[in-house]
Amino acid sequence: MSLLEVSDLEAGYGPVTVLRGVSFSVDEGRIVTVLGPNGAGKTTTLRAVSGMIRRSGSVRFDGKDVSRYTPEKMARQSVAHVPEGRGTFTGLTVEENLRVGAYPRRDKDVAADMQRCFGHFPRLQERRSQHAGSLSGGEQQMLAIARALMLRPRLMLLDEPSLGLAPKLTRELFSILEKIAREEGVTLLLVEQNANLVLKFADDAHVLEAGRIVLSGTAEEIKADEGIRRSYLGV
Amino acid sequence: MERFVQVIVDGWATGSLYAALAVAVVLIYRSTGIVNFAQGELAMFSTFIAWGLIEAGVPLALALLGTLALSFAGGMLIERVIIRPVEGGEVLTLVIVTLGLYILVNSLAGWIWGFGNRSFPGLFGDSQLDVAGVGIPVESIGIVAVLIGVVGLLFAVFQRTKIGLAMRAVSLNPDSSRLVGISVGRTLMIGWGIAALVGALAGVLLAPRLFLDVNLMGGVLIYSFAAATLGGFDSPFGAVLGGWIIGIAENLAGTYVDFIGNDLKILVPLVAIVVVLLFRPTGLFGSPEVARA
Amino acid sequence: MSSRRVRLLAWGVVLVLAVLLPFFFNAYRVGQFTQAMALAIAVLGLNLLVGYSGQISLGHGAFFALGAYTSAIAIDDVGVPYLLTLPLAGLVCALAGFLVGLPALRLRGLYLALVTLGLAIATPQIIKRADGLTGGTQGLTIDKITAPAWSGLADDQWLYFVTLVVTVATFVLAAFLVRGRVGRALVAIRDNEIAARAMGVNLARFKTGTFAVSAAYAGVGGALFMLPIGFLAPESFPLALSFAFLAAIVVGGLATIAGALFGALFIEFVPVYAADVDEALAGVIYGGVLILFMYLLPGGVMGLIRKLSSTKTRPRGSDDAEAGAGHRVGGGAAGADRARERVRAQ
């Protein structure tokens, strides 16, 4: 049984339907990516999974039916969503951003986890008392991920983490993500436009086009696919 | 000279009352972007509740605590029942709802307790303190002290507690707040509850100085808005400072400027609003977003 | 039948009913309807300002008072015939509105609301202070208006028809303004100032112009309003009056002409600023109804009528004005780009 199972997901904004029956699953411990061009519905997919928008169809997390859950409830189920645009609390300090990331937790290990986050992202430690609004784009992305990590999530949803970042920074970020995934056992579901980059480090991939999943498989399989190579990998 | 000091102190105390209501207004504005035109009437209603409890024989301190608790609950209820359905909606809709609430609460108080006026017991007594040869009413000192205490307490809550962190998060970014598991609705309710509580405090401190009637807070509202504007509409500290400045300025103008006398003291907050908005819309401590609002 | 014809027909029916009305009601009622019409003119003025050009004003009562006092002083002290005081009140208020509209250019949304709120609050105080002119707290009385012999009407009926004629004129004028170039420019300003400016709309001229026209309407309404009573005092123009105007435009329907009628009827017949003990409950009901209106009918009565009749022919241009009317009001520049995010608790 997969950690996350999505079937026939339909969602949209007002009169516009974006997702027209999306189905895929995410196995625990894997790094999974959803690829697709602009407008395919990648962000919408994550929003639908975490409950930010109204949707029909079924979403099951850890065997539970979470199709009607609000984002707050999903967070309490240990699903952390790093949204489009990062969504950092610009008026709070870096440290406060991390603290609020652990909001639903009642255990005593929050401080220790914060240290571990700083371990993953030393740059954030340097800036821990600064307002998040004063951080660069790359640092804000790290902060957003670190905040999500503070939830001790079983599943982390990431919306285009590479957006707006220089290639070097993106590579650094992805290697940290991989480290987090393997060491902390967090399952990652990323949506990305940059297929080249993400297929190098993901385990599984799904391709989303015009609101539907058109291809699913391991990253190797997707990379090898002729159509994909032409459309997404520029080969 | 003695007179001058007394005018200043009296203005400081009155200014603290403006500040208290202004803090309530700012709290709500910060967290939801709503200007609650009914804040003063809610405070007036709370003051009547206090009066009712005292009339029923409840000891003063207990009556006040009870009033604060009831006001907190009332504030939460109002957010949940009256404001929630239109939250996030059009500006004008919200303006009308809070105006409607103003009218409703004002009339409700009149319906329950009548439109006559009555006296309200002072909390600090009538005595004066001799400070360097000048007689300063204890009440004035008490009011200022209470305000400082309350604002200090609020600061501690906002900066050091989990719920305070949640409230700040919600006012910065409600969507992200949901994603970290904060119940935005519940947090907003608490914000309104706190605002109602602070407003109630303003009411019970003001009532002994005037008469308690349904129009108790009607005049104060514009002063509080002026204080909030001067301070920067999303800064509680600004509201306090703004309130003090307006209170002192008003008293000085009313005492020493003949043209203004007692009738036109209202010009002080109005001029303050106009001047601030035309020349420095962010006020003393407001954030840049405030100017663009 | 095209929607335009339907609308004209509806107005025609209303007009016929209006003409017949005074012959079926007693003098007191007729007086109330006269006042309702006077209010409607003022409400229409506010709707031009708020609904069409998107500038929130909580101070409309100030212009209403200015018009009323201008007219009363002209009749009382200067002996101007009351009919001539109407355009006089309009002109004085237009000037005042323009003067307020100038600094208002620099204010948006909340801040404009606050400043105009201050104006409304200051009004009774200023009236009292200028007692040499206004009679202060004693108020002013004017001689009762009598119907001319050739009309064959009772006094109350005569005043009713005078008011009706002025009302029709102001409504028709407003309709022309709104449906033409001016209206389109105003809606463009309301919805997106930056885009409007880019399209060549002179923001300052239109916005201050709208303030002037809106104030003029309020002034004429104010002058007409006090004619049946013959007496005015500072208490006649409390803050509640400005609130009532604002409530009226939303209850009637933002950015609509007809809405002014419904709104005026609403505020005339649910009196809000007579603070008698008996009317305490009326205040509770009034406030409650306002709030319920916002939950159920944020588009006002006209919004409901439009919705009901949208199953038939869809009216063209006017819908665009109303769509987004509430949404954009007070948003000012880049309405969608508001820095202060409205919080919605789900």
Image (tube, coloured by chain):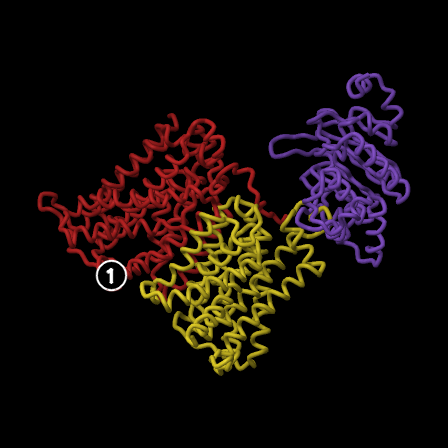
Chain colours: A purple, B yellow, C red
- Chain bearing mark 1: C
Left or right: B272 as drawn, with respect to C261: right
Residue A168: x percent and y percent? 81, 31
Residue A169 vertical position relative to residue C29 in the rendered view, above or below: above
Which residue is at the front of the view, B254 or C57? B254
Judging by the rendered image, the residue that carries numbered circle 1 is: C131
Amino acid marked by disc 1: Asp
Label 1 secondary element: helix
Residue C265: x percent and y percent? 34, 48
Left or right: B204 as drawn, with respect to B256: right
Left or right: C143 as drawn, with respect to C281: left
Residue B73 vertical position relative to residue C305 in the rendered view, above or below: below
Which residue is at the front of the view, B273 or A217? B273
Q: Please tell me which residue is depicted at 73% across the width and 30% down the height of the picture.
A: A21
Q: Please tell me which residue is depicted at 51% across the width and 63% down the height of the picture.
A: B21
Residue C156: x percent and y percent? 19, 51
Residue B293 vertical position relative to residue C13 in the rendered view, above or below: below
Dividing the image into 4 quarters, which one contains the N terminus of chain C?
Answer: top left
Residue B195: x percent and y percent? 57, 61
